[in-house]
């Protein structure tokens, strides 16, 4: 959601903060602002509505100088998109500035109390309540760290906050409450950085400290002092991040999404690296802190996630149930947490929660993991962002995707990497449960080894047709995506990709259900994208295609290269190579990503930052 950056050190704070905000642009936002302090010039606040370039333009006309500062990109939750509502916000004296990511759930009650005390508010935001409260306690305590401490005790919700006060011009105060988003503190040489997402500061340092829920940090150029909300001091480890910041740059590509689609063969290799032992027919998931004995006990898995990651969870269900014969239920994390799930069967500790998340910061997914913990059920996370909250919350260890930063809001390489990580996990579980013999595992490993090359083939060979189809269909208003079994989630994902970046209304449906409703929508203007690679219900899928044709729908099929029957039935066939049916979704989804991408480009949409969306959703 909102992006946060802070700096204290010898550099021009404005440059560091703006650079960081630029790196966070992908989060999606509607306004941005900075507050910079210099002892001679004083506090300088600049805010602008719209893209970061508006703020940059403003700063060209009204530059800011100083060696301490904070910056923010806002994704509105409380209060409309106006300059007044943009962060940073100030306390009543104007000496304290605050930025926040999250929601102050009890802000109306707090605001009411502050109004009674005579405070006036200029914005409609919940964040200004934090600023006023901080100022209120600062008057009494004359110490911003302690004022933050008092303030946090009154806030309800999930918040990541950074503030500074001109009377203490050598320090930033950062705090984290709940799971509204992370705070990383970068350790430099006589300088410190703060960011909500690590790509914001990776160009300056790879040594990061991550704040935990209820941590308050006082950050000076040469020190970081962390205290818990209950007052006890605490040390947090320094993590060294191995990502290459260059990997986060767009290079020659027009959009990050396009680059990330093309990066998939490499990402698929990276998720496999060091995890397959071809010779002995074994899967090694070293980061998984569960041994064979722990894994053998698991009889039920609750897979939980949001958005694209939820589609990965739906695919994971097929993989795990088929390979390891362990039952899997899949829930939207936002539903799971509120439905009072019955996780543990009697006294047997046979249940596991599997959380899947690219960012590791999606608030609903984190809450689902916490629900598991509250019920004494261990969780395993499949996660991309190193050191993220989900990675740290997972009892069974994070299975890292190692896909590198994913910047485009529409997930691509993280999705296919999630599918492969889920496959590895399913095989690892099967290994422990003895449902597959080493020879069978060897065959699956062989399929995995071939997969990155096949993904490269799909990208290279189907791109021209995807572009042609995008040219032909980019003016439609609706599209239907059909798949069955393990390819039904791929139909959902294809529809999600198209709608989120091109704003075409698209629905994914299990093909067998089409006759119970969506068939009424089909006419000669409706493109129907049918996933029809070979599996045990291929013939049924062909019948569904016939039903679409009979209603004059335009059939675009994803099928195996050289499938003549399909070529006869469909208007267009996008041919993909054959892999194991459980891995086929990885290859089938790639043309759908490319189709959505090119449609969005032709419609002139903002591919990497679609309207109203954010890369990681840290509010409910
Ligand atoms: C947002 C993003 C999606 C993503 C979802 C879950 O909606 O726009 O691309 O799939 O969040 O994110 P996560 O980081 O938990 O995978």
Image: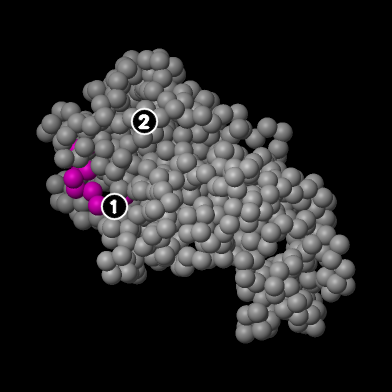
Identify the residue position indicated by label 2 in the image: 209
Q: Judge left or right: residue 286 versus residue 223.
A: right
Q: Judge left or right: residue 124 versus residue 272.
A: left
Give the residue displayed 29% in from the left and 52% down from the top: 157
Q: Is residue 101 above or below residue 516?
A: above
Label 2 element class: strand
On whether residue 153 falls in the magenta region, the answer is: yes
Identify the residue position indicated by label 1 in the image: 157
Q: How many marks?
A: 2
Closest to the observer, 480 or 538: 538
Q: Can residue 45 be seen in the rendering of this structure? A: no
**Gap in Å between the C-alphas at discs 1 and 2?**
23 Å
Residue 172 sits in quarter:
top left
Residue furthest to the left: 140
Q: Judge left or right: residue 510 versus residue 327.
A: right
Q: Judge left or right: residue 619 versus residue 606.
A: left
Q: Residues within 10 Å of mark 1 (few under 14, many from 20)?
A: some
The magenta-colored residue range is: 148-158
């Amino acid at each position: 959601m909102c992006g946060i950056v802070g700096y204290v050190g010898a550099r021009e704070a404005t440059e560091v903060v703006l650079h960081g905000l630029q790196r966070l642009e992908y989060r999606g936002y509607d306004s941005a602002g900075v507050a910079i302090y210099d002892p001679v010039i004083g506090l300088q606040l600049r805010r602008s509505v719209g893209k970061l370039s508006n703020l940059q333009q403003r700063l060209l006309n009204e530059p800011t100088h100083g060696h301490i500062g904070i910056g923010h990109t806002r994704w509105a939750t409380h209060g409309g998109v106006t300059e007044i509502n943009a962060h940073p916000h100030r306390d009543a004296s104007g000496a304290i500035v605050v930025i926040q990511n999250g929601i102050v759930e009890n802000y109306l009650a707090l605001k009411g109390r502050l109004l009674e005390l005579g405070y006036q508010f200029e914005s409609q935001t919940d964040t200004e309540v934090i600023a006023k409260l901080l100022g209120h306690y600062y008057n009494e305590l004359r110490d911003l760290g302690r004022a933050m401490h008092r303030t946090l005790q009154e806030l309800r919700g999930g918040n990541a906050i950074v503030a500074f006060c001109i009377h203490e011009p050598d320090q930033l105060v950062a705090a984290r409450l709940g799971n509204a988003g992370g705070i990383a503190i970068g350790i430099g040489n006589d300088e410190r950085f703060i960011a909500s997402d690590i790509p914001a500061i990776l160009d300056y340092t790879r040594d990061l400290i991550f704040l935990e829920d209820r941590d308050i940090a006082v950050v000076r150029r040469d020190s970081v002092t962390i205290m818990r909300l209950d007052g006890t001091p605490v040390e947090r480890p320094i993590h060294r991040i191995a990502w290459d910041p260059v990997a986060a740059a767009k290079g020659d590509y027009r959009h990050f999404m396009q680059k990330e689609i093309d990066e998939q063969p490499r990402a698929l290799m990276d998720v496999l690296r060091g995890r397959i032992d071809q010779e002995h027919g074994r899967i090694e998931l070293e980061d998984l802190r569960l041994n064979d004995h722990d894994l053998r006990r698991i009889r039920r898995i609750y897979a939980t996630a949001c958005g694209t990651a939820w589609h990965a969870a739906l695919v994971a269900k097929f993989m795990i149930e088929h390979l390891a014969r362990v039952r899997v239920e899949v829930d939207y994390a936002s539903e799971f947490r509120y439905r009072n799930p019955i996780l543990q069967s009697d006294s047997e500790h046979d249940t596991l929660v599997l959380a899947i998340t690219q960012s590791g910061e999606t608030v609903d997914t984190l809450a689902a993991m916490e629900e598991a913990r509250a019920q004494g059920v261990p969780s395993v996370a499949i996660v991309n962002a190193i050191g993220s909250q989900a990675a740290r919350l997972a009892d069974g260890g994070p299975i890292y995707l190692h896909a590198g930063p994913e910047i485009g809001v529409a997930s691509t390489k993280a999705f296919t990497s999630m599918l492969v990580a889920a496959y590895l996990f399913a095989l690892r579980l099967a290994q422990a449960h003895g449902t597959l013999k080493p020879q069978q595992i060897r065959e699956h490993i062989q399929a995995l080894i071939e997969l990155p090359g096949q993904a490269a083939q799909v990208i290279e060979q189907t791109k021209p047709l995807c572009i042609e189809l995008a040219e032909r269909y980019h003016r439609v208003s609706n599209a239907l995506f059909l798949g069955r079994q393990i390819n039904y989630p791929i139909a959902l994902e294809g529809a999600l990709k198209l709608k989120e970046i091109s704003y075409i209304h698209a629905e994914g449906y299990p093909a067998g259900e089409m006759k119970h409703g969506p068939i009424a929508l089909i006419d000669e203007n409706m493109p129907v994208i049918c996933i029809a690679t070979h599996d045990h219900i291929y013939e049924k899928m062909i019948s569904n295609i016939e039903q679409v044709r009979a209603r004059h729908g335009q059939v675009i099929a994803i099928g195996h290269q050289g499938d003549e029957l399909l070529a006869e039935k469909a208007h267009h066939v996008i041919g993909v190579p054959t892999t194991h049916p459980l891995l086929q979704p990885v290859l089938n989804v790639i043309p759908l990503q490319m189709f959505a991408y090119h449609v969005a480009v032709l419609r002139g949409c903002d591919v990497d930052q679609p309207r109203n969306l954010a890369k990681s959703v840290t509010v409910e």
